[in-house]
Amino acid sequence: MLTLLFVLIIIGLLILAHEWGHFYSARKLEVKVEEFGFGFPPKIISWVRGGIKYSVNLLPLGGFVKIFGEHGEGAGNRESFISRPAWQRFIILAAGVGMNIVLAWVFFSAGTLAGLPYAVDDQKVPISVVGVLPGSPAEKVGLKFGDQILRITTSNEQEKINEEQQVRNFSEKYGGKEITLIIKRQEEVLNINIVPRAEYPIGEGPMGIALARITTQAVSWYQAPWEGLKTLGRSIVLTVSGLVFILKELILEQKTSIAVSGPVGIFTMVGDSRSLGLGYLLQLAGLLSVNLAILNFLPIPALDGGRVLFLGIEKIRGKKVSPKWENAAHAIGFALLIFLMILVTFKDISRVL
């Protein structure tokens, strides 16, 4: 239940910040905003202030903004979005993405201030799981990132774990047989039964886990913004590189080796991140904000990037694209995105089950 609450809060903040960017830029450019909604309908309550309707809605997943003229209405009216110069429309469209980038920087900075897990060479720090391979025995029994391995036992042998090599030696010795891992997950001590593989791919190990000594390190308040900015830059580069790699694989091989996650996958990631502390959770939120910004700026109809694409076409042609055709393209794009979301969600559920 707590994980679901975290997911709702994170997704809500990402969407709300994105829509606030559109709202703020439209107001500054004196384009009429018809409604700013907190959450999604059905509506709970609404009021009008300064000629703008503000609403609080039942589904707490961010918000929405309705801008006069965004669908082509009000041509010739100065307050209409469609009547504004292309550069002003670009600012309004790009402002949502800009806010997600700013929010990511805030999350990354706060994460470094709260403290992040780092690998250390300190014998006083317990051995922890820092990686779980897909399809491995460790994944099947539910081992998670951050689990501390305290002891390993069998019916006639027990060993206290002080070194990473002990885990590998013990699991190799009992390959194909059931052993019990005594682990610490947050404040809870658990017994997990697992059967290490007698034969396994090179580099994976009998259980399919990576181990290290990890502890939390925080930076000073005056260092946090700079460290957050560096993390933001790295995240943007890695996200764009990963996206290019996925597109390349899809075009050349009609498949991708990188797992793509939707809401269910995010739920799982947040649940796993909670065990690593607030700093790691904030870093995940920052990464999600970067992903939302970049994906939303792709030149796909229904996304902000798709609307910017039509602005580019307008500049090349020297006249506006017919609102009828543009709205039709966005409707088709929206339907395809919904279908893709359903497909990704189905795959997420199948991985969890």
Image (spheres, helix red, strand yellow):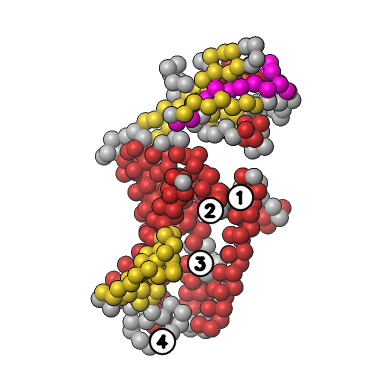
Sooner in the amino-acid sequence: mark 2 or mark 3: 2
Cα distance between the residues tagged 1 and 2 = 8 Å
Q: Amino acid type of disc 2?
A: Pro
Q: Which badge, 1 or 2, comes first in the chain's sequence?
A: 2
Q: What residue sits right under mark 3 in the picture?
A: 303
Identified by mark 4, the residue type is Ala
Q: Nearer the viewer, mark 3 or mark 1?
A: 1
Image position of 154 with respect to 298: above or below:
above
Say whether residue 114 is visible: yes
Identified by mark 3, the residue type is Leu
Of the two numbered discs 4 and 1 on the same chain, state the one appearing first in sequence.
4
Residue positioned 32% across, 34% down in the render: 219
Inter-mark Cα distance, 4 to 1:
44 Å
In the structure shown, which secondary structural element does the residue marked by tag 3 occupy?
loop
Q: Please tell me whether residue 161 is drawn above or below residue 70 in the rendered image.
A: above
| Separation of marks 2 and 4 at Cα, in angstroms | 38 Å
Viewer-nearest of discs 2 and 3: 2
Residue ID for mark 2: 263
Q: Which residue is mark 1?
A: 348
Count residues near mark 1 (Cα–Cα under 10 Å), then give few for <14, some for 14-19, many for 20+: many
